[in-house]
Amino acid sequence: MSQPTETERRFGEWLGGLKKDEDRGTLAALRRGLGAEPEAIAWMLRYLPPGLGNERDEKAMCLVAALFAYHPMPWPDQPNERGWSNIGASLARMVAEDRQRTGETPASVENRFQAILECHPEDLPQHLRRIIGLLRAKDVPVDWAQLLHDIRGWGWERRTVQHEWARAFWRPGKAAS
């Protein structure tokens, strides 16, 4: 299981501080970045903490900051029973709560999850906006440091991130192999 770096954890803590401090102005400004193209996000850099990465990292940080501003609900300190706190785990939590209420798993969630697992890195922001919208609608938390870490690793040839998300979603109660 791939864990966030110290820098990614610090970024997640900074995001949590925006909510804790009720920094509505910064959150509103960051939310404007939700629909922005990656080339047009330079204005967001004024809101990010300095010294946390290179240009590629900044793009990922801007995306995560905008998503956080849209759904400022951080993952609790405790990961799930397998130690996962990635997007797959958040969606699994949402589906489990839905299943408890209705007795079934919404096919639309599984379809969107399958689509994000198969998406190209360039399409990841639009897929994440949809997934975060689902989580927001159900008040399901997100581990923002883990999401930043996963976005930075999305294009890895071995597709490690996608495999970890799939395991967290489809095999949350299985023993680690």
Image (cartoon, rainbow, N blue to C red):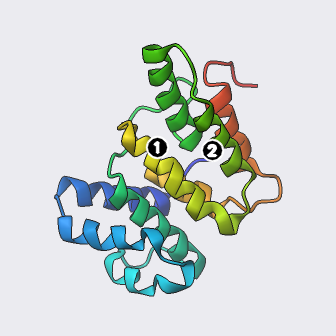
Residue located 60% across and 37% down the image = 108
Task: Name the residue that disc number 1 marks.
Answer: 134
- Residue 35: percent from left, percent from top: 46, 71
Task: Tell me the quarter of the picture where residue 57 sits.
Answer: bottom right
Mark 1 residue element: helix
Q: Is residue 82 visible?
A: yes
Q: Is residue 1 visible?
A: no
Residue 111 position (above or below residue 129): above
- Residue 60: percent from left, percent from top: 54, 68
- Residue 109: percent from left, percent from top: 58, 37
Left or right of 69 on screen, residue 97: right
- Residue 63: percent from left, percent from top: 48, 67
The amino acid marked with disc number 2 is: Arg
Of 121 and 174, nearer the camera is 121
Of 83 and 36, nearer the camera is 36
Residue 87 position (above or below residue 95): below
Question: What is the number of the mark on residue 112?
Answer: 2
Whether residues under marks 1 and 2 lie with C-beta atoms below 8 angstroms apart, the answer is yes
Mark earlier in primary sequence (1, 2): 2
Q: Residues within 10 Å of mark 1 (few under 14, many from 20)?
A: some
Image quadrant holding the N terminus, namely: top right
Left or right of 153 on screen, residue 130: left
The amino acid marked with disc number 1 is: Leu
Left or right of 80 on screen, residue 76: left
Residue 137 position (above or below residue 169): below
Residue located 44% across and 55% down the image = 9
Label 1, label 2: how many angstroms apart (C-alpha)? 10 Å
